[in-house]
Image (cartoon, helix red, strand yellow):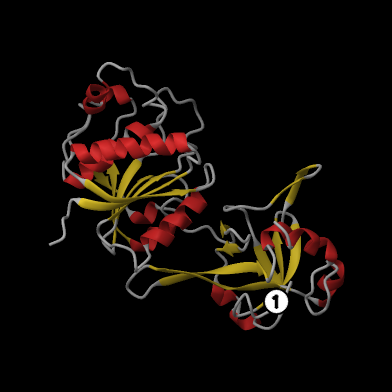
Amino acid sequence: MKNPNKFYLVVIADYNDSDAHGVVHDNLFYWFTHQDLDILEYDTVDVRPFNTVQTGYMLARRALNPLSPSNRQVFFVNTAPRMDDTGSRQTNEGEGFVMAQLKNGKKIFAVNSGHTLSFVKPALEKLYKLNVPDDVNDMPLLVNSLQGKGNIGAGQFRSGYVYPIVTALALSGDNDGISPGFKSLIGDEIDPALVPDIPDETIVYRDGYYNIKTSIQPDSLVAHFGKFAVVSCGGEEIIAHISKGMFNVPLHHFSLAPGSTILDFTGGRKRQFVEVALRGGHAGKAFAEQISTGERFAPVEGHDITWRPADKDDFSRLDFGTDGRPPRRILESALRL
């Protein structure tokens, strides 16, 4: 019989350093053990700082994977730019911490910021606010555990010291308030409709090959297969073959095609993402923006990207061959990392 107190824990966050990951790791294990819960496997996923689009995409890729563990896979998600209020914050408070139950049985504990939950929105079964005080000194369980050692940054680093307690308590079934100001841990139910949709015409992921996955709808390409597109991003433009797959084009040519990422929301609803690729190269490099002399930065998740059918004047204007071959100036940078 499977033990319901054993979990596969996935931490998705914009920490990007071993110090923060180490604190979160230790504190999650501490509070899981405190609640008689076991972590069978601990996995970490780094995302770009403050980038909730990439966070949401990575969360969906893992949480909606039908081949991964189901109701025992738990996600601890923290990308918190704290941009919900532009005013000063007296106690480092910010976007609320929520608990989501997906239709496939998995649970998500996340800072509800930006597009973090957008990519799993159609798969949300229930979404609840978690009652967390703004000031860590209002959490007796945490204060007592520190045993007079001060808050050691507990207020500043909420995901390190506050959210592990909340996650462990919720998973254990303990619904008592963690602060005198709350009667329960689990607060009001949130209407999933309030979660932002996946942003349109946006880069949702740039992979290690610099292929660009976008939120462009695949259906918009169907009538144009076999033709060419002008793809625009960051003030740069390229011409790409509109194709059914990224390898259905000659070597060192760009493609605009339905990509390999397909999210399964259950109930027959799916979402596929259009991808911009350079066969044998790195498409993202073609859109790199020059910030200063010698420095160029490829676009990342959240950047706008659009396309339109190419006309005959576009080829000469952009110096592309009529067969779609890119000019040397683009290939010189896009064929190397």
Q: Residues within 10 Å of mark 1 (few under 14, many from 20)?
A: many
Residue sitting at x 45%, y 34%: 19
> What amino acid is found at the position of numbered circle 1 in the picture?
His
Q: Is 300 on the left or on the right of 129, as rendered?
A: right
Q: Quadrant of the C terminus?
A: bottom right
Q: Is residue 8 visible?
A: yes
Q: Compare residues 130 and 261 and report the one nearer the observer.
A: 261
Q: Is residue 304 above or below residue 34?
A: below
Q: Quadrant of the N terminus?
A: bottom left
Q: Is residue 147 above or below residue 107?
A: above
Which residue in the structure is indicated by mark 1?
Answer: 241
Q: Where in the figure is residue 287, as x and y percent of width and height?
A: 72, 57
Q: Is 240 on the left or on the right of 142, as rendered?
A: right
Q: Where in the figure is residue 293, as x and y percent of width and height?
A: 81, 42
Numbered disc 1: secondary structure: strand
Residue 165 quadrant: top left
Q: Where in the figure is residue 209, as x and y percent of width and height?
A: 62, 61
Q: Is 14 on the left or on the right of 139, as rendered?
A: right
Residue sitting at x 36%, y 59%: 63
Residue sitting at x 67%, y 67%: 307
Q: Is residue 185 visible?
A: no
Q: Tally the marks.
A: 1
Q: Where in the figure is residue 74, as x and y percent of width and height?
A: 30, 52
Farthest residue to the left: give it: 1
Residue sitting at x 34%, y 28%: 134
